[in-house]
Amino acid sequence: MSNVQFYSGEVIPLEMHKVRIVQKLDLVPIERRLAAVNEAGNNTFLLKNRDIFLDMLTDSGVNAMSDRQLASMMEADDSYAGSETFTKLENQIRAIFNKEYFLPVHQGRAAENILSRVYVTPGSVVPMNYHFTTSKAHIMLNGGSVEELIIEEGLQTTSDCKFKGNMDIAKLEAVIAKHGAGKIAFVRIETGTNLIGGQPHSLENLRQVRAVCDRHGLMIVFDASLLADNLYFIKAREEACKDMTIREITRELSDLCDIIYFSARKLGCARGGGICTNNRDAFMKMRELVTLYEGFLTYGGMSVREIEAIAVGLVETMDMNMVNQGPQFIEYMVSELVKKGVPVITPAGGLGCHLNAMEFLSHVPQTQYPAGALASALYLVSGVRGMERGSISEQRDDQGNETYANMELLRLAVPRRVFTLSQLKYAVDRIVWLYENRALVGGLTFVEEPKILRFFFGKLKTTTDWHTALVAKFKADMGDSL
Ligand SMILES: Cc1ncc(COP(=O)(O)O)c(C=O)c1O
């Protein structure tokens, strides 16, 4: 929100856009929701959109697009090679990130595949502030391992630390000393750290990481997928940056990094991705793999319409009134839940509101996947679809043992400019009801468990018939209400 204060003193986010296209939503009755959650094996990824009211699974590819983005898509230059549309995006990348070379890919994980294939070899190590599911999977697939060096506050569920996504510089030095710089493929910084609640890092922290990397001749690879939210937090929370423009902050972050990659399903509000760098050697190595896995160098697996939309979306992201929309709506939701005593990750981060399932369902042991159970229960009582970000999102070790997550979170993503305030109020209302009835919720156990990225396709069943008890209580309290 721009500098607008409400006379009432209420702190509520104000939309700096108007809605011109809408999509009809249905809220199906609880009986249908019960059938749907069972058909989906209690995995919200397997629900059908027709059964969902508010889709808070992710922001990926579902942020609202602007009129200018949609208009630009009509101008796309559809040619296999040498498309003008690609040149537009390349020029914007140069203007915004100050990086000469740009490689298009079809989405963020495709960039991770290419980076890992080029730089990760068996035995190599990738220090990072925190992992993301696909980034870790690609590093491991190439025989590498990750070292997570998030500051201690990063894993505390409630805190007033403004930059819980910061890397611990002493730990970085220690990891380099332990493995030797020669074993380190690159240092990965994830901006707006997804799996620990969309928590930001500061510009100052990145400067410190750069200084260490310079001393040891290491490369910084910056995952900029969640850059929009992190830019907002740097401007809003980092005293030294409060007078910088969003463009200046972006440029300074970029200049500290050797390679930047992003999912344009998140950054740029369209669908696609890219890698950029000033390092010609890195560009040449990755270029071959782009043509092999993605497509020719002027589309990289993306439709040219999406490339147009990304070019416009990136420019629009360089605006405080755009990057503040997600974080301020999330802040509103988090503060309403805190008032009601619901355990959520604080301070509010980007990407979404994160319920702390370990505390919400403190009676459900981690062996029974509390975050997955909470996702199932919330969908059942509200039609709101969230995403499990806990142990189900981890994978078993080489011996087949569970590797339990540091945090059991239910992420309720708030895609940018998509939901209204009353829709968020509805979600808060049902979460509060569920919290008051949490004793009725039980655990989950796998019935189908894929080996890789099991959270996408795995199916689970309830450990007891707690769904029935929850539906009965809902009907007793809410009567005919959907
Ligand atoms: C931080 C981060 N990196 C990488 C990715 C992968 O991007 P994509 O889903 O486009 O493959 C994501 C997606 O959620 C992400 O949040």
Image: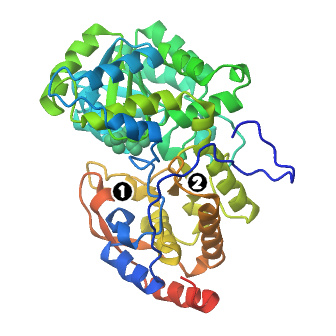
Query: Is ligand 1 within 8 Å of the beta carbon of the residue shown at mark 2?
Result: no
How far is mark 2 from mark 1, CA to CA? 26 Å
Badge 2 element: strand
24 over 393 or under it: above or below: below
Q: Is residue 14 visible?
A: yes
Quadrant showing the N terminus: top right
Which residue is nearer to you in this view: 98 or 303? Answer: 303
Q: Where in the figure is residue 462, as x and y percent of width and height?
A: 40, 78
**Residue at 31% from the left image edge and 57% from the top image edge:** 456
**Residue at 65% from the left image edge and 70% from the top image edge:** 429
Q: Which residue is mark 1?
A: 402
Quarter of the rendering containing residue 363: bottom right
Quarter of the rendering containing residue 343: bottom right
183 over 461 or under it: above or below: above
- Identify which amino acid the numbered label 2 is placed on: Cys
Q: Which residue is mark 2?
A: 353
**Residue at 63% from the left image edge and 21% from the top image edge:** 245
- Identify which amino acid the numbered label 1 is placed on: Glu
